[in-house]
Amino acid sequence: MKRISSSLYVVEPGEVVTITIEAVNTPLLVSVSLDGKGFALHPGSPITFTASLEKGTTHYLVLFFSFAEPANGVYKGQLHGEEGGTFTFSASQGPSQTESLELEFRVGSLEAGKLGIDPPNPWPHG
């Protein structure tokens, strides 16, 4: 896995991506959406998925973080690609008590997406 930006990564076809999340000063309250399918994160269990789409297409992952009082909660996370690459991220508590993180995992290479073979963007905000 290669990091292009804080929200864009390139993964190899068939590569397994593992995401671990630690909650600091807040209970672990995280919901996950991968390619539009939602599921809950269970304490102590990582999120794992395989880059199973065609080369040049993109997996979309959204992490929804909820925070409890007091207002100093932080989520610390790590992305790890089976083919290499380990990257960190964090989400800090804001006034709304929720935060989200949107990540894209392009399968193969960025150049393939420029050929017009990428599916429409499933992000609800376009």
Image: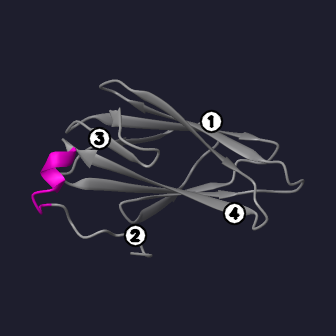
In space, the residues marked 1 and 2 are separated at their CA atoms by 28 Å
In space, the residues marked 3 and 2 are separated at their CA atoms by 18 Å
Q: Residue at x 20, y 54 (%)?
A: 57
Task: Name the amino acid, label 4.
Answer: Thr
Lower sequence index among marks 3 and 2: 3
Lower sequence index among marks 1 and 3: 3
In space, the residues marked 4 and 3 are separated at their CA atoms by 28 Å
Q: Where is residue 100 in the image (x, y as percent from the top left)?
A: 58, 59
Q: Look at the image and tell me whether residue 13 can be seen.
A: yes
* 21 lies above or below 81: below
Residue range (magenta): 110-117
Of 95 and 75, nearer the camera is 95
User: Which residue in the rendered view is the most extreme toward the bottom?
Assistant: 125
- In reply to whether residue 70 is colored magenta, the answer given is no
Give SS at disc 4: strand
Q: Mark 2 points at which residue?
A: 123
Callout 2 touching callout 4 (CB < 8 Å): no
Q: Name the residue under label 4.
A: 98
**25 lies left or right of 78:** right
Give the mark toward the camera: 1 or 2: 2
Q: Which residue is drawn at 58% across and 38% down?
A: 77
Q: Which residue is drawn at 41% across and 44% down?
A: 5
Give the mark toward the camera: 1 or 4: 4
Q: Name the residue under label 1.
A: 44
Badge 2 crowding class, 10 Å Cα cut-off, few under 14, some 14 to 19, many 20 or more, is: few
**37 lies left or right of 115:** right
